[in-house]
Amino acid sequence: MFVKINVASFLVALFVVLVEGSNVIESIVEDHEHSIGTQWAVLVAGSSDWYNYRHQADICHAYQLLKKGGLKDEHIIVFMYDDIAYNSENPRRGVIINNPHGQDVYKGVPKCFNWRRGKVVNSGPNDHIFIYYADHGGPGVIDMPIEPSIYAKDLNEVLKKKHASRTYKKMVFYMEACDSGSMFDGLLNEGLNIYVTTASKPDEDSWATYCSFSGEPCLGECPPKGFNNTCLGDLFSVSWLENSDLQDRRVETLEKQYQRRDVQLLYLLSKFQDAPEGSTRKSEAYRKLSEAISEREHVDKSVKYIGQILFGVKNGPKVLNIVRPAGQPLVDDWDCLKSFVKIFESHCGSLTRYGRKHVRGFANMCNAGIQRDQMDAAAKQTCSS
């Protein structure tokens, strides 16, 4: 059974989640000013029903990412309808995946359906809060499984109240929804110390990916057999989630992650959006966008797996992302670096302009003493299948 509440109740509930239990008196604020803060996360999948599979998949993937990063369940609040994993249309009962080759992201996810009596963000003045929302939206509104929608002004008022309560140091808000930029554009006050990234500008759609619909070509890579008439993820969400899976999160910054949504993809996406529906130009633009995304995923995953073969699953990402101190060259043996790039391309295809970001990883392989025959074997094992 799912709880339906009206919009006023929802806004009160959101305020309760963020603020209740956190009215820190002045003396406590002073005591905590130099302490190490706690990291909190609020993950919201606002939709329900099978055709909205992707929103709960995005949120569950985010939960697994946070858990892997060290957050405890008591500091992660997940709101979702939980009607996907055991949905009668789910070909993998009890399992949710967020990409065609992904593992189960549903296992272990704590769910909360009651917005008034669940866990709260009992944060202090030195704590960091991450909020991630995935659902539908429109200009100045976002959807929830309630009526009516949540308006931008009301959401920003809640954020201002949270700031006024002096119960966080920094907040990051990721929003996946159409027109999601309009939820903050001209409304988010400076000085709140909130970093916001949205899936779309104030006047554009966000896009799903890994989709399969009867009689239509797949959008992005095709999902596994049986996942009919739905999408496994959202383009913005899987971009930052898969980026976080691949990158060393100790050195990857929010700015670096944002920049990975680069000009080429934005250009191709704009060409797709601007093309007339049903036109040849639309189909061609879609093909080019899908190919660009697939090529990037192939390069990223290939380099990641080569690193894991050479250095182990745990140490691979660490070694590939080592940045040498200022004054030291990128690599000691430049011939080794050139040969490793050639070896990669001989087995895994062109590194591409996008893939040049991985040259540091190849350099670190050389610096770690990896031999050409080891690199050749690892690249062959990774890309021969």
Image (tube, rainbow, N blue to C red):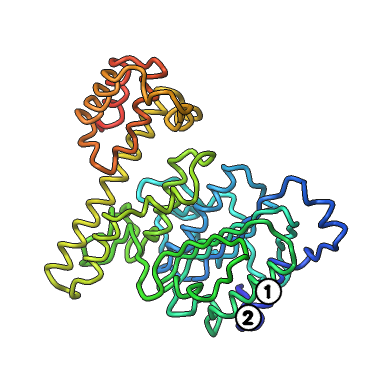
How far across and how far down the image is residue 35, in percent?
77, 46
- Residue 35 in view, yes or no: yes
Please give the residue where the numbered disc 1 appears in the rendered image.
Answer: 13
Q: Residue at x 39, y 28 (%)?
A: 307
How far across and how far down the image is residue 274, in percent?
22, 72
Q: Nearer the viewer, residue 326 or 166?
A: 326
Q: Nearer the viewer, mark 1 or mark 2?
A: 1
Q: Nearer the viewer, residue 159 or 211?
A: 159
- Dot 1: element: helix
Question: Is 16 displayed left or right of 345 in the figure?
Answer: right
Q: Residues within 10 Å of mark 1 (few under 14, many from 20)?
A: many
- Dot 2: element: loop
Q: Amino acid at mark 1?
A: Ala
Question: Is 288 displayed left or right of 321 in the figure?
Answer: left
Q: Which mark is residue 5?
A: 2
Q: Which mark is residue 141?
A: none
Q: What quarter of the picture does the N terminus occupy?
A: bottom right
